[in-house]
Image (cartoon, grey):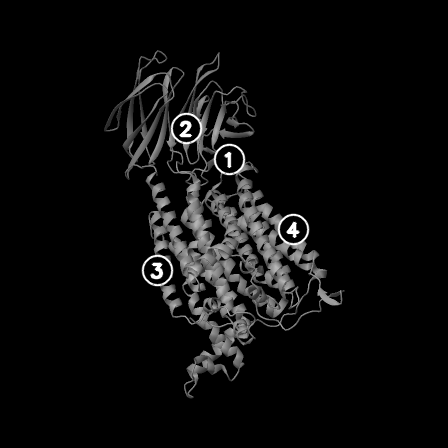
Amino acid sequence: MQKLYVCWKFNENCCRMYENQNSFGEESSIRKTVVYEQEGGTEKKKYPRAVFFIIGNEFCERFCYYGLRTILTIYLTKRLLYSGNYATVLFHLFAMLAYFSPVLGAIIADSWLGKFRTILYISIIYLAGCIVLAAGSIPAPLGDMRITSLVGLFIIALGTGGIKPCVSAFGGDQFAPDQTKEIQRFFSFFYIAINLGSVISTFLTPILREDVHCFGSKSCYPLAFGVPALLMIVALFIFIVGKPLYVMHPPEGNIIVRVFKCICHALGRKMKSSEKKKEHWLDYAEDKFDKNLINDIKIILHVLVLFIPLPVFWALFDQQASRWTLQATRLNGEFYGYHIKPDQMQVINPFLIIIFVPLFEYCIYPLATKCNLLKKPLQRMAIGGILTAASFVIAGFLELKLEGLDPVFPAPGYTEMTIINNSPCSIKINKVGNLTVDTTIEAFGNKIVGNITRNTLNDWEFVTENCTALSDPEFKKTFNSTTDIESMMITIHDGKLEVLKTNDTKIKAKSGKPRVRIFFNTEYDFSKQPNSSFMVKKEDKRYLIETENLEFPTLGLTSYSEFAPGTYDIHTPLNATSHNEMPVGNIRVRSGGAYIVSIYQNSPSDGNFSVGTITMIEENSIHIFFQIPQYVIMTAGEIMFSVTGLEFSYSQAPSSMKSVLQAAWQLTVAFGNLIVLVIAELSLFDKMSHELFMFAIMMFIDMIIFAIMAYFYNYVKSKNTEESETRPEKGKSNKAYEEETDFNK
């Protein structure tokens, strides 16, 4: 996750960069007076209470953003019925826009509205997008839901990105320039608020999505999106309440705009100028722009060259919420009676971040330094990138294993038929069209017949053996198979053999949950109670399975219904609104499986039923915890690459250029999502494992290029380092420390 890491490490130089800065870190020349109190003859500045409103606002806003982002991929595939590839495109388009818009938000704040009004106005727009998205998820015609939801996501992307660069800088504005320790504490709390909001919402919203039922649906996306919208209302309220306490600076102009104008002017003059060639092409802007600004731009361009390979990292990192979540839908999430939702696996990353940041800072990096390893930030970034690539290698091998468990489909032009004998008689099938079958299905048994020619009228010949319930032991019927997977029920009705055929599937549910349908032959007359249904029940959970298109009043089939894994009792209908208390049988369903339950009422007088279960799709046999290694390695890579990258960038940039650097960093995230969007849209690979390996190879190559660029990079010595060298030496000189921190080596 793209979060604020740097001040968690209590690095004084790191936190100092936020003092007196604008929306992207640019230094401000205006500060309001800070209240002082006398204490023992010395002046002590009060800790600004305003920051607690800003921290509360950030917690609620991050809860909102990560909550809706967590369930977005499954919402797009499961509810809006987009394909996995197209859902990936939409997700990364949303993420890309969310990281392009911070530049716009910073320009508005620094050049026009100021931070407070920018946060306020854009938060209102952000809230409107959350409400539109929640409203769009209410069951309605699919086209209307898609349009409304996509409009809501567009508005949210503008809103969350628009306030992203303003909130942290606005918090830094509340402190006096010399309140270094207080600023460190603030950004640590700020960081914790981000991660707490992320962890809680990532765990909670999938539960709201799946375990709550509303609007006649077996899920509740309106609530899952509505709760984040409610938190955004709370965020806005907290932010407004704190207004009387805020230190607010007027807008002073945006450095990004000035940098862009300077570069354009220099390029324009260079192309038109006939004067003597200057030492650097930016020197052509000296007629209009300050020399210090031009020199700072030269330094920042030196650093920005290293940003060129960075988008590939974000291309991999942000797939945790798209490709990795889709992978999790095909894994078994059962854990001691609890069902782990596929989108809940994303909680691992923010949880590990909280553990790994201090672990790396106080254990891993010091140990590596003692071994003369990972002493330079660019070295850490390169290793972090390699770890990220390794996480995709692991994900690719897991995907390979899953692909090996995928169901086998018939050859093109043929149908595979699952035949269910829902009767007390043995039935022999002699022929299906020109195909000689010659197979016998025992009473209440089932068999699969393949290689049935599709889109052709085929005569089926059935013969019962020693069946006293039938007057005619032979039966013929003509069917036209139109899909690759179909199922058929053979049963007895009014002394005759009846056959019902329907389309079926071997594709797992996009939600990862098991699916069940029922083939039945009972004495209950559904024609008199057309809204009747079967019920499956487990403790406090109840699910209704509705019938469809009944050809006969007492026998037929239902469509597939999804519910959580577990063992359920099956209840037949008593009337249109209630069910018999005594179950007719039970069924155990597992994650990813698809099942057909056959119900046959043997005797109307004693209510005796024969119940069987046919597994159409095998359950997910690989546990969801097998994703943990790839998450652990990805998070370690994130710490080394992203956190170190932020610190390196700020240490190398002049103070006036920190805003440009932060804008460029956000844009690398946006371009990373653009890479995924393009690859997903091109659909280059038939198998997901191949795509995952391709991303891993791309990242390895990218890090080789980055390592070569880093090798030839000359570190810029910071002002703090220069100042320390001119100070009188106190105590013994620490040569090891000097060598370690000499970035010119």
Q: Are marks 3 and 4 in contact (CB under 8 Å)?
A: no
Q: Position of residue 351 (x, y in %)?
A: 52, 48
How far apart marks 4 and 2 lie (CA) works out to 47 Å
Please, what secondary structure does the residue beneath circle 1 have? strand
* Residue at numbered disc 2: 596
Asked whether, in this view, residue 640 is left or right of residue 181, the answer is left
Please, what secondary structure does the residue beneath circle 3 have? helix
Q: Position of residue 105 (x, y in %)?
A: 57, 64
Q: Which comes before the other along the chain, label 1 or label 2? A: 1
Which one is in front in this view, the residue at disc 3 or the one at disc 4? 3
Q: Residues within 10 Å of mark 3 (few under 14, many from 20)?
A: some
* Residue at numbered disc 3: 701
How far apart marks 3 and 1 lie (CA) works out to 41 Å
Query: The C terminus appears in which quarter of the rendering?
Result: bottom left
How far apart marks 3 and 2 lie (CA) works out to 49 Å
Q: Which comes before the other along the chain, label 3 or label 2? A: 2
| Residue under the image location 64 percent in, 59 percent down | 120
Q: Which comes before the other along the chain, label 4 or label 1? A: 4
Front residue of this view, candidates 282 and 113: 282
Q: Which comes before the other along the chain, label 4 or label 2? A: 4
* Residue at numbered disc 4: 234
Which one is in front in this view, the residue at disc 1 or the one at disc 2? 1
